[in-house]
Image (tube, coloured by chain):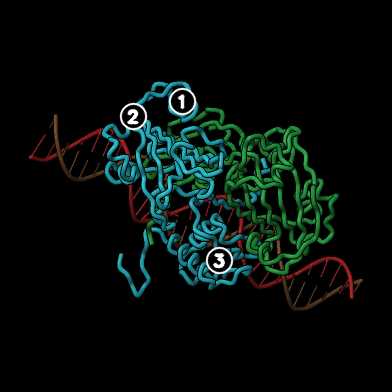
Chain colours: A green, B cyan, C red, D brown
Amino acid sequence: MFEQGGVFTPRQKFAHIYSVLKKRIESGEYPVGQLLPSENTLIVEFSCSRNTVRRAISELVREGYVQTRQGWGVCNIFQPIEPSSYTMGVIESFRETSNRTGQKTATRVVRFEPCIADRKISVQTGFAVGTELFYLQRIHDVNGIPLIFNHSYLLKECMPQLTRKIAEGSLYEYLEGTLHMTIITSKRTITVEMATQLDFEWLEMGSYNCLAVVSNQVYNSDGVLFEYTQSRHHPQIFRFQDNAIRRSHNTKE
Amino acid sequence: MFEQGGVFTPRQKFAHIYSVLKKRIESGEYPVGQLLPSENTLIVEFSCSRNTVRRAISELVREGYVQTRQGWGVCNIFQPIEPSSYTMGVIESFRETSNRTGQKTATRVVRFEPCIADRKISVQTGFAVGTELFYLQRIHDVNGIPLIFNHSYLLKECMPQLTRKIAEGSLYEYLEGTLHMTIITSKRTITVEMATQLDFEWLEMGSYNCLAVVSNQVYNSDGVLFEYTQSRHHPQIFRFQDNAIRRSHNTKE
DNA sequence: TTACTATACTTGTTTAAACAAGTCAACCAG
DNA sequence: CTGGTTGACTTGTTTAAACAAGTATAGTAA
């Protein structure tokens, strides 16, 4: 695959088109509230098939950059937003999020011990009763202030060599980099819960008595649930973004 | 379009395949943790093209029912979950959510007045300064208990005839049914905020001093922002689901 | 046994073509 | 002027075909 005067053959052509369009929207090249060039126009510009253009556009729809309407066109509805702690639909580790938002962060391991899933743990995490796990408590400091309390259950079978030392660093770097594990899907539930004794002890709660709780089930590439993490966030640093699309086929069939 | 022994021609073929596969997964017809039939097998069964099967499957991926892996297959990772108040990526009105979860609900309009967007409102809602709006405060009761406080700003231009009476009923039924307005995109932000004086006055807060706050920007089919709603939920009835997929092309380009 | 290779699968990406369906403006008949 | 039709656009759905790339297994050569 050679470059030819800026024209190259990326692994994913649609990803290239997607990022070009995205940049144009972000930079205001396409006026907000108006239509983007039609699919046929974009096909000519990028010299690709219609499907490839459409895949790029549907990504932008998912992200709330544009919306489409049959017979009319693709409308730019971009509004610049502050880089949030969380963006919906994308898996990111705490470290990755921190880097993206440019905050100074640190992680402390408060507790590290093997354990076996009993009935209660099983119901909460989704691991079968009797499964061998690691239980991990971590505090995340943001700009020096302890603001996130993590409870993690990790499948021992997937990482028998895991030590407290490793958990001090980036867990995901270890899993993906060293163990070559691939994470594909993560199921998250967001709730708001009353702060516990532990939360008050370890976090800088101020006058708040609640936290944003993100419960996370992570699956590896074999479809095996290997991590359950409950992240308890101080309200002041929690923010979650989501773009929803009204589906006409909700009511069908 | 005639039915022929159960075989029919739906408007969206992939939606049919999607819902059949979904039902099979939910009913346990496909064992959890194992692979679904391959694309080629499904093509034969549904007598359709590969693309159509793939579209159906990618919907299931988005919903966290299955995950795919190149060279391997489509793995069933379904876990039954309680019907939650909110499901990510789907726009639903309060009434629709209530019906789905089977709760007895009511809506009271506490305040209804025209207003004009000043600088502060503009920053919060995304409406331009000087825009004519309706401002609306509503309380939602769940099983008789006041648990949600809604602040809404509605674009007057889109619904000049709106009255307090109409707002007492289902706003979305009015907009979609009577005005034939089509809602396409909704941008949501979830945060946790300290309860205000107003919250304590109107809601049954108990010992909680925080709420789950869902800020909602809704666009109609012309790409015009016509509604901003801030929903302030009592923690006990707030729950939000999300399925994330780790994208390899995050790092590319 | 061990390590490599061929091969027969799997999903991922791209192209091309056709038709369906929604939108809008220009046109025409009344 | 009014109302309906036509036609030229737009996006939405489906098909067919080809190749790329990842996975697992069976067979082969060392």
Which residue position holds label 3?
B39
User: Mark 1: few, some, or many residues within 10 Å (few <14, many ≥20)?
Assistant: some
The amino acid beneath tag 3 is Glu
Q: Is residue A47 visible?
A: no
Mark 3 or mark 1: name the one nearer the start of the chain. 3
- What percent of the width, then of the height, locates residue B158? 32, 33
Which residue position holds label 1?
B122
Indicate the secondary structure of the residue bearing disc 2: strand
The amino acid beneath tag 2 is Glu
Mark 1 or mark 2: name the one nearer the start of the chain. 2
Quadrant position of residue B250: top right
Residue visible at 33% across and 72% down?
B4
The amino acid beneath tag 1 is Ser
- Which label number is shown at residue A70? none
CA separation, marks 3 and 1? 49 Å
Indicate whether B6 appears above or below B122. Answer: below
- What percent of the width, then of the height, locates residue A110? 79, 48
Which residue position holds label 2?
B113
Tag 1 and tag 2 share a subunit: yes
- Circle 3 marks a residue in which chain? B
Image quadrant holding the C terminus of chain B, namely: top right
Indicate whether B243 appears above or below B193. Answer: below
